[in-house]
Amino acid sequence: MKDTLLDIVKHTHTLGFLNLVKIVSDSKETTIESMADDRSVIMKGKFHKPVAGIDGTFGMPQLNKLDILLKVPEYKDNAKITVTTRDKDGVKYPTGLHFENANGDFKNDYRFMNAEIIEEKLKSVKFRGVTWDIEFEPTMASVTRLSYQVQANSEETSFIAKTDGTDLKFYFGDHSTHAGEFIFQPNVTGTLDKNWAWPVAQVLQILKLAESSSLKIHLSNEGALQITVDSGIGEYQFILPAQSK
């Protein structure tokens, strides 16, 4: 359970823009959804194995609190993390998590959000299918180079991704001000020739997950970007609608 919770926090709260998640779970699968407040990023995920003991639909709010609890030294070794439930019409629904240290003298409770509230706060967004023109697995070297450009162009909140021959280039700024560009991925197949822009901070934070997970980028000339991250525990799809620039 703890590994799953750590994985959830890592792919939501730690990124800095996903603060509320919806979990839907049964005996066959456990899925997760989240969305940035400004709708710049939509996340949909699925764990490789269904998570036992959490059947139902519920929300996980205040992920910063969950993050703190998971890092409390009292819960580092041999801690017990159990799912609390309530009975309704003979059916058990998950209501939260109970933390207890090995000695049983240090405890905390984290409350879930009920189905009705999370369905209202985090309405599912349907992503219409698009044709991915370019797909590849980025290297950490490319992510590091992106980080350098972000630092050099700190005033820019977005960048443009376009192909130049077989090179995928990222562009910052324009000729009327400070600007920068670099090859993010060489030898790609497919074409991106429109001035779609993508949010710098969000894209960089997601790409940094490549340090410990396998990651794949999907780009469409129609104006869609998807970054698929496989942590070994679950697969997370981060979908970013394009911005006009």
Image (cartoon, rainbow, N blue to C red):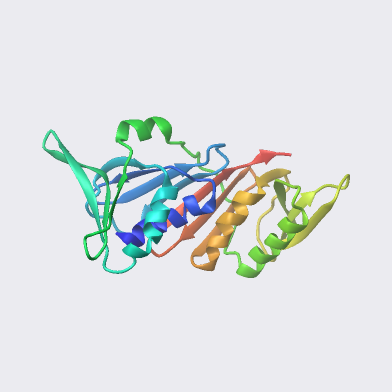
Residue at x 49% of width, y 45% of height: 18
- Looking at the rendering, which quadrant does residue 107 occupy? bottom left
Say above or below: 223 vs 136: above
Residue at x 53% of width, y 53% of height: 15
Which residue is situated farthest in the front direction here?
105
Asked if residue 234 can be seen in this view, the reply is no
Residue at x 25% of width, y 48% of height: 54
| Along the viewing direction, whichever of 115 and 50 lies nearer the viewer | 115
Say above or below: 15 vs 34: below
Which residue is situated farthest in the right direction here?
176
Instruction: Tell me if 187 is positioned left or right of 213 in this view.
Output: right
Instruction: Tell me if 19 is positioned left or right of 49 in this view.
Output: right
Instruction: Tell me if 221 is positioned left or right of 87 in this view.
Output: right
Say above or below: 174 vs 126: below
- Looking at the rendering, which quadrant does residue 9 occupy? bottom left
Instruction: Tell me if 234 is positioned left or right of 182 in this view.
Output: left
Picture coordinates of residue 127, whole percent (x, y)? 49, 39
| Along the viewing direction, whichever of 234 and 196 lies nearer the viewer | 234
Total marks placed: 0
Picture coordinates of residue 7, whole percent (x, y)? 41, 58
Quadrant of the rendering where the C terminus is positioned: top right
| Along the viewing direction, whichever of 90 and 103 lies nearer the viewer | 103
Picture coordinates of residue 139, whole percent (x, y)? 61, 68
Asked if residue 149 can be seen in this view, the reply is yes
- Looking at the rendering, which quadrant does residue 222 occupy? top right
Picture coordinates of residue 238, whole percent (x, y)? 51, 49
Quadrant of the rendering where the N terminus is positioned: bottom left
Residue at x 72% of width, y 62% of height: 148
